[in-house]
Image (cartoon, grey):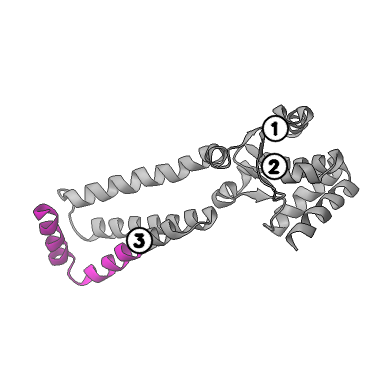
Amino acid sequence: MNVLLGELHCYGQCLRSWAPFVAIFVILSIALITISLMLSNPRKKFRIFLFAQSAGIFAVALTYYIMDCSEMLSIYLYSVYLLISTLMIFGTLRYYDRIMIRKLGAKPADSFLNWTQEFVEMLTSAKLYYFDSAIPRAFASGRSIFISIGLLEMLDDDELKAVLAHEAWHIKHNSGMPFMKQLALMAFSLSGDPELECMADRFAAQIAGSEALSSARDKVDKVFI
């Protein structure tokens, strides 16, 4: 503790007039991290955390630029934290769907409806899961598609194909999207990016027919209106 306090005193002496600017970015980083921990929306949580990382990296870079910090333990520790936490953020992109599987208690859909997984594999490389919820929901995350029992009970086979095709489009084009859109839940039953949803709907209409797509949307919209 005495070592760290001594280093903080050194920063104040060496940075002089720059110390308040560095302190602002450090405080901003800590505040944003705290806010991200309080949020429940995954998309907002990760966006705020990325801003926090950026503020922290800028504070470290500014400190390195202004003074010689090569022998300071606190800079080493914070740099290691930034590296590890940043790797964890981008690693989450690869394993986010696995997190959702555990969170929802989802199970492979081919054990419930045999033809659904085969249909999805005709469109893209993805695994289809169902989860126990009466709320009609379907969304794509990572390389997985999730659909609720409530939606399965509500739709006929043609309507279900339209929904699966819609989500398969999101999976197929996920790798070309910006980072935050890759991480977001691309949901048929919730409003998302209008342009992406429109393109996914056009693909679904080509695969399952515009009538099946329209019917599926009408049934889902009536629940959320």
Kindly indicate the quadrant of the structure image that contains residue 104: top right
Residue 37 shown in magenta: no
User: Label 1 near label 3: C-beta < 8 Å?
Assistant: no
Mark 2, residue position: 147
The residue closer to the viewer here, 66 or 27, is 27
Q: Residues within 10 Å of mark 2 (few under 14, many from 20)?
A: many
User: Residue 38, image x and y in percent?
Assistant: 43, 59
Can residue 168 be seen here? The reply is: yes
Q: Residue at x 76, y 27 (%)?
A: 114
Q: Amino acid at mark 2?
A: Ile
Q: Which residues are magenta?
A: 1-28
How many numbered callouts?
3
Q: Residues within 10 Å of mark 1 (few under 14, many from 20)?
A: some
Majority secondary structure in the magenta region: helix
Q: Residue at x 85, y 46 (%)?
A: 205
Closest to the camera, between mark 3 and mark 1, is 1
Mark 1, residue position: 109
Kindly indicate the quadrant of the structure image that contains residue 15: bottom left
* First in residue order: circle 3 vs circle 1: 3
User: Residue 102, image x and y in percent?
Assistant: 53, 38
Identify the secondary structure beneath mark 1: helix
User: Label 1 near label 2: C-beta < 8 Å?
Assistant: yes
Identify the secondary structure beneath mark 2: strand
Q: Amino acid at mark 3?
A: Ser
Mark drawn on residue 211: none
Mark 3, residue position: 29
Q: Residue at x 84, y 40 (%)?
A: 207
User: Residue 67, image x and y in percent?
Assistant: 19, 59
197 shown above or below 117: below
Q: CA distance from mark 3 to mark 2?
A: 37 Å
Query: Can you say which quadrant of the picture contains the C terminus?
Result: bottom right
Q: CA distance from mark 2 to mark 1?
A: 9 Å
